Image (cartoon, rainbow, N blue to C red):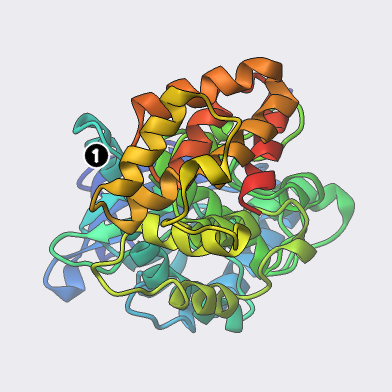
Amino acid sequence: MSQSPLVKPEIPSGTLIDSRYIIQKLLGQGGLGRTYLAFDTRRFNEPCVLKEFAPNGTEDNALEKCRTLFKREAKILHQLEHPQIPRFLACFEGDGRLFLVQEFVDGKTYSALLHEYQKQGRAFSETEVIDWLEKLLPILEYVHKHNIIHRDISPDNIMLPEGKDLPVLIDFGVGKQIADFTEASTLNYLPLVGKMSLVGKVGYSPREQISLGLCSPSSDLYALGVTAVVLLTGRDPSFLIDQYSLEWNWHHYINVSNAFTRILDKMLADTPKQRYRTSREVIVDLEHLQQPQDRSQSTLVDLSYNKIFPEYNPKANVQQIMPPLNNQYKELASSSFNQPTSHQQISSLNPVFLQRCQQELANYIGPIASLIVEETLAENPQTTPYEFVELLAREIPEVQAAFEFRHHLFS
């Protein structure tokens, strides 16, 4: 029978460790050890995080290899100095346990923040997530330049400190490296930071990491992309990916601008060569999204709409452009063009666009498409083109077919 990885009992509250750190309470535990809140008696009882690692097995040879790996990784992490990464303070060994000391972040994880939003009946907005990405990507750019891959990015490992607006990336690597060793010792290799990994969170980590243990900066960008769509939709990754085709269908749950959708889809590409290679590439594309404050998401959609349908003319006579529409349909469109509405309202009811939607939808659900388009327009006369397509896509039963429908209209 194999021995449990947790070979040591939990350290009681009030215990003095290394003649310096007083254990206050258990913060969490996993298969390789525990995390405690502690006070540093040599720094006026400043709070800190004490991470205990208890490697699987008791063989001297295995423990010595873990000890060597632990010190090597700790030395690498000690080099990281970034205001959005908890400071590495110390590492030591005692009673057959390996300890890592880090700065304590007093705040909430984005998992907890999302839960609070959901209680209010909402999730993170597109603007909030874009701002959040712009604040996080420089951290990844920094650590990747140090040849370190985080490998476990998720809402649980990103925190917002109390009273601050810059997110902090937590739970860097020493424990992960030991996990790699304990799982891979039979393969006779010791994984290096940024080179190999046999750990990661299912749903957030890309396939090459989970299946092959391969990591690169694009692996972290994939996990960051998953975290972004989780914050946008308020749903777990298992609900956002098709279990048979393994294709992402997060688009069904939230409407965001086409430009931002393309960025997220590229971050979530299945193969590394289709993804962004560096954080800088994502930052540059996000900078292109910057628009004046008074320009809405729907305006961004309209810009691409005019490119797709150059024949669009809001002053054109409805009957001349689209004679196949019935009278009720034409009245809805005509009345909208005669009103002093915004560009958003005009473009969303453009008859050329409506005819195109009807034709495309008929390819998937048949002649009933004309009725669906008419009813959807009657119920949503002032919707944007993007929102209108999303409403129609919901009438297509198959996920892949609905995706193709969207792609044909807004590619």
Q: What residue is drawn where x is 57% and y is 54%? A: 223
Secondary structure under badge 1?
helix
Residue 211 lies, with reference to residue 305, above or below; the image says above
Question: In the figure, residue 34 lies in which quadrant?
Answer: top left
Residue 344 lies, with reference to residue 349, above or below; the image says below
Residue 118 lies, with reference to residue 182, above or below; the image says above
Question: In the figure, residue 169 lies in which quadrant?
Answer: bottom left
Q: Quadrant of the N terminus?
A: top right
Residue 392 visible somewhere in the drawing? yes
90 or 221, which is in the foreground? Answer: 221
Residue 152 visible somewhere in the drawing? no
Q: What residue is drawn where x is 69% and y is 45%? A: 408
Q: Please, what is the three-letter code of the amino acid marked with disc 1?
A: Tyr
Residue 258 percent location from the top left of the image? 52, 56
Q: Quadrant of the C terminus?
A: bottom right
Residue 95 percent location from the top left of the image? 47, 53
Left or right: 51 as drawn, with respect to 76: left
Label 1 Cα crowd, 10 Å radius (few <14 / some 14-19 / many 20+) = some
Left or right: 43 as drawn, with respect to 318: left
321 or 388, which is in the foreground? Answer: 321
Q: How many marks?
A: 1
Residue 69 percent location from the top left of the image? 66, 67
Residue 94 percent location from the top left of the image? 46, 58
111 or 181, which is in the foreground? Answer: 111
Q: What residue is drawn where x is 42% and y is 65%? A: 133
Residue on which the image places disc 1: 117
Residue 237 lies, with reference to residue 17, above or below; the image says above
